Image: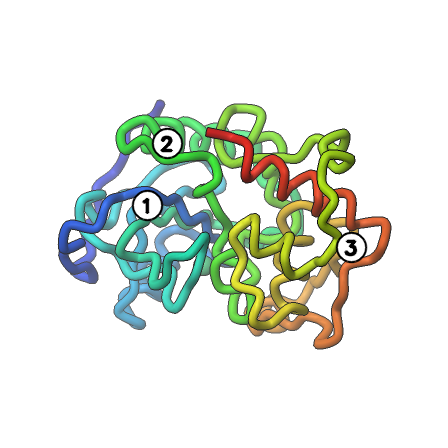
């Protein structure tokens, strides 16, 4: 792996003994240097930024709490900056067009190392959109979750598992995976961004994307239900 460039930002705090058990993946429609400017202006941070060319910058030491996830929820835990490492991907399309292979390779190597260091479970490798579904769309519909899951980074479903699940209530199943379902349309849309992007509308306008516009009445279609069931099974049967 190419050398990680240190570019420290002062926007962090102590973890106060919270264990590191999650990886939150983000993207922004900026080059890495622009991103550092934007984060600094807003007094935000992430542990790492990865450029489209695969170059990795480290902004905050892993043992410190970076400010990247904001108000967030996953599998019973809230305010996930305490428990997570945050990685920002530079993506000028904001995850609407395929990520470059070099960038994904650098990301995969980094994720694998971090997961091994802290024993992070694949259930806890998430999108910012998974943990803040009403607010955030990143890292976007084109993020290659299945490819990463093949390498043990996050989980992907096996459709044959759907038959093992009797539950057919969408909210119950989404909650079993880890979503906050208090806004069911948002949680359903976030699920599709991650696992069923064929049901997500591709948006070219970055400002619209940043506003996380999703159909207020969005509901999972009947044909998507087996994907949801298969995911719920996987998330609860992997050690
Ligand atoms: Zn984000």
Q: Mark 2: few, some, or many residues within 10 Å (few <14, many ≥20)? A: some
**Residue at (27% x, 29% y) in the render:** 117
Whether residue 94 sits left or right of residue 103 in the image: it is right
Of residues 197 and 17, the one nearer the viewer is 17
Separation of residues labelled 2 and 1 (CA atoms) = 9 Å
User: Which label was assigned to residue 110?
Assistant: 2
**Residue at (37% x, 66% y) in the render:** 70
**Residue at (38% x, 60% y) in the render:** 69
Identify the element where label 1 is drawn: strand
Query: Which label's residue is closer to the chain start, 1 or 3?
Result: 1
User: Which residue lies most toward the bottom here?
Assistant: 216
**Residue at (78% x, 50% y) in the render:** 225
Q: Mark 1: few, some, or many residues within 10 Å (few <14, many ≥20)? A: many
User: Which label was assigned to residue 204?
Assistant: none
Residue 166 at what x, y percent from top left? 74, 44
Of residues 238 and 107, the one nearer the viewer is 238
Identify the element where label 3 is drawn: helix
Q: Are marks 2 and 1 in contact (CB under 8 Å)?
A: yes
Separation of residues labelled 3 and 2 (CA atoms) = 30 Å
Q: Are marks 3 and 2 in contact (CB under 8 Å)?
A: no
User: Which residue lies most toward the front here?
Assistant: 166
Identify the element where label 2 is drawn: helix
User: Which label was assigned to residue 199?
Assistant: 3
Separation of residues labelled 1 and 3 (CA atoms) = 30 Å
Nearer the observer: mark 1 or 3; the answer is: 3
Q: Quadrant of the N terminus?
A: top left
């Amino acid at each position: 792996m190419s050398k990680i460039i240190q570019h420290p930002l002062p926007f962090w705090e102590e973890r106060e003994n919270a264990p590191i058990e999650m990886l939150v993946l983000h993207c922004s429609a900026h080059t890495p240097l622009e991103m550092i400017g934007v984060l600094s202006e807003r007094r935000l941070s992430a542990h790492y930024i990865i450029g489209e060319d695969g170059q990795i910058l480290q902004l905050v030491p892993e043992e410190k709490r970076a400010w990247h996830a904001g108000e967030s929820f996953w599998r019973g835990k809230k305010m996930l900056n305490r428990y997570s490492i945050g990685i920002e991907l530079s993506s000028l399309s904001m995850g609407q067009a395929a990520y470059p292979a070099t960038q994904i390779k650098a990301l995969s190597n980094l994720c694998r190392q971090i997961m091994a260091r802290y024993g992070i479970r694949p259930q806890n490798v998430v999108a910012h959109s998974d943990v803040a579904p009403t607010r955030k769309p990143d890292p976007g519909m084109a993020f290659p979750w299945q490819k990463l899951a093949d390498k043990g980074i996050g989980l992907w479903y096996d459709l044959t598992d759907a038959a093992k699940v009797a539950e057919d209530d969408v909210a119950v199943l989404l909650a079993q995976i880890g979503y906050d379902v208090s806004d069911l349309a948002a949680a359903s849309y976030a699920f599709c961004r991650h696992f069923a992007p064929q049901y997500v509308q591709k948006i070219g306008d970055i400002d619209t994307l940043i506003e996380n516009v999703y159909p207020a009445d969005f509901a999972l279609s009947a044909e998507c239900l087996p994907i949801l069931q298969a995911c719920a099974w996987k998330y609860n049967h992997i050690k």
